[in-house]
Amino acid sequence: MKTTSEVSVNASDKGTPFFLTAITLVATIGGFLFGFDTAVVNGAEKSLVDFYITKALDASNYQYAVELITQYRVLVAMVFTLVFIIIAGLIIRLAEIKKGVIINGVILIGLLFFLIKYLGQSLPSQGASADIQKIADSVKGFVVSSALTGCIIGGALAGFIAKALGRRAGLIISAATLTVSAFGAWQPELFNVFGTLPVFSFIIYRIIGGIGIGLASLLSPMYIAEISPAAIRGKLVSWNQFAIVSGMVIIYFVNYLIARSGNDAWLTTSGWRWMFFSGVIPSIMFLILLILIPETPRYLMLKGRDEEALKTIIKISGKESASRIREEIRETLHEKNAPWLSFGFLIIFLGIILSILQQFAGINVVLYYAGNIFRNMGASTDTSLLQTIIVGAINMLFTIIAVFTVDRFGRRPLMITGALIMAISMLSLGFAFFLQQTGLLALFFMLLYIAGFAMSWGPVTWVILSEIFPNSIRGAMSVPVAALWIANLIVSWTFPILNDNIWLTEKFNHGFSYWIYSLMCIIAALFVYKFIPETKGKSLEEIEKFWKKRK
């Protein structure tokens, strides 16, 4: 059977639209799995806590609590060490060896100090329910956000993999790890080869899946951006965000239907398992379809495979434009191993801050903990999952709006407007909780927030990241993508700690954290206004020339 790249296509002067559409849709499955696999925990969060963590709060299970806390601390220490190794590699690649070693030495001293102090903490005494509760809240945050640790690893490695193996090969690795994760999270006891409590076997498999998500989060928009004509690149890259949102909506429906298949006791013991197992189907489909698509022309030319690249360009853009496009790409590939700071630190700085602000705006608090938030409003489990579907539907609707406006209105206007809508929504949602008006008014502000994010910071952040990095340092995208996932982990891990804190709850009725996210949205709007250039309608090569002038 011939692959798509081998099939003979009678390309017109304008290319073959079906070919471009087909390979774009395959690449967006990476985005679909991104949304599907990160949002699946939304429906399973309460069941996981009840099944694995709640019994640690029972005085009669003190020994289990000790084992849970001990293994949790060891696993967290290992995660921090692993993240340090990843970041150290990025710093050396950024600052070069001599400076990188000095910077990493300082960070290592801080890490060692943290590990010694963290692992040396005494265990809560039997009957100290308040201390155990605090640690249980932290474990809960780690269970929910564990995949994000893998996302940091995958996102950080994606640039290296994209350069060494190719964009398509990286996506194949992503699909494979997501398949393994779906099986492992389904039966963490059966596939427990780690010698840990089952809850930590579950976490490790989620981390493995997170590596796949991290790879896809960078490589899917990178692949789409590199195959897209400039005039429609924003739209096509935005389809990746639409796929992310579609994955979330589908898994919300799946979670709801699974929850309706049995009672709460069944959901706690077995139902949540099928939520994670459902990811096997799209991940295997992604793996198969990736075999049928070509590598991007820019990567092929990086490897000296010019004729193969030309064939793909002809299919995408037509014979008339193919030679010109190939020459434009060749002009930007004069340095195959360009240092990441070849264009200065500004590009990387903008990418890092943009990524961090996208997460600090609080979006994944809503997407991962929507069920928990709705239960705080007084909804039952089934009702909260149904309301989560509404959140997903609004997310999808306004992402579609972004897809059709990003190349018309530009990146900056959408980002600034969206950030201001999000700021007002989060501020109002915080007051709704504070004043205990958690009915339809609170739901409205949550949906308004989702709408603001979906039409702006959701898709457009990825569009900008895929555009601003020149071809010769495209691997440097790993830095802001890793920063994005680190920020995601921080927000997702700390939300239960803030939201369930007894003192904060007594003072602010669960409203405090939303005010923090509102402030971050205001900062995001100001940052875009001050620093982010408009890239609408510019080819990747034109954007590269812009950065050369700014050096």
Image (cartoon, grey):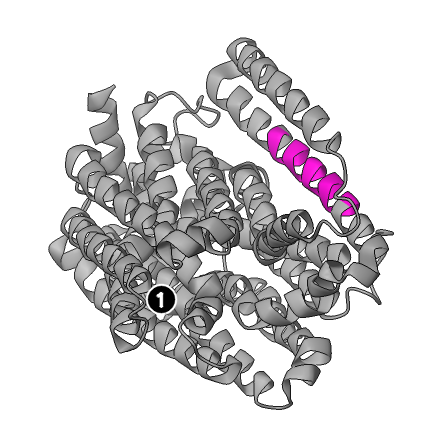
Which percent across, then down, holds residue 376?
44, 69
State whether residue 91 is above or below residue 247. Answer: above
State whether residue 443 is above or below residue 334. Answer: below
- 198 vs 389, left or right, is right
Name the main secondary structure of what is drawn in magenta: helix
- Indicate the quadrant where residue 344 lies: top left
The quadrant of the image that shows the C terminus is top left
Which percent across, then down, holds residue 96?
51, 15
Camera-side residue of 487 and 309:
487
Camera-side residue of 106 and 516:
516
Give the SS element for disc 1: helix
- 431 vs 264, left or right, is left
- 233 vs 536, left or right, is right
What residue lies at 64% left-to-right and 53% top-to-bottom?
133
What residue lies at 46% left-to-right and 73% top-to-bottom?
375
Residue 75 lies in the magenta-colored region:
yes
What residue lies at 28% left-to-right and 56% top-to-bottom?
426
Which percent across, then down, holds residue 415?
21, 50
- Indicate the quadrant where residue 122 lies: top right
Residue behind mark 1: 242
Which percent across, then down, holds residue 61?
82, 60
- Within 10 Å of disc 1 (Cα), the crowding (few <14, some 14-19, many 20+) is many
Camera-side residue of 515 and 260:
515
Residue 295 at least partly seen? no
The quadrant of the image that shows the N terminus is bottom right
Q: Residue furthest bottom?
A: 261
What residue lies at 59% left-to-right and 46% top-to-bottom?
149
- Indicate the quadrant where residue 367 lies: bottom left
Residue 306 lies in the magenta-colored region:
no
Amino acid type at image mark 1: Phe
Q: Give the range drawn in magenta.
A: 70-84
State whether residue 270 is above or below residue 72. Answer: below
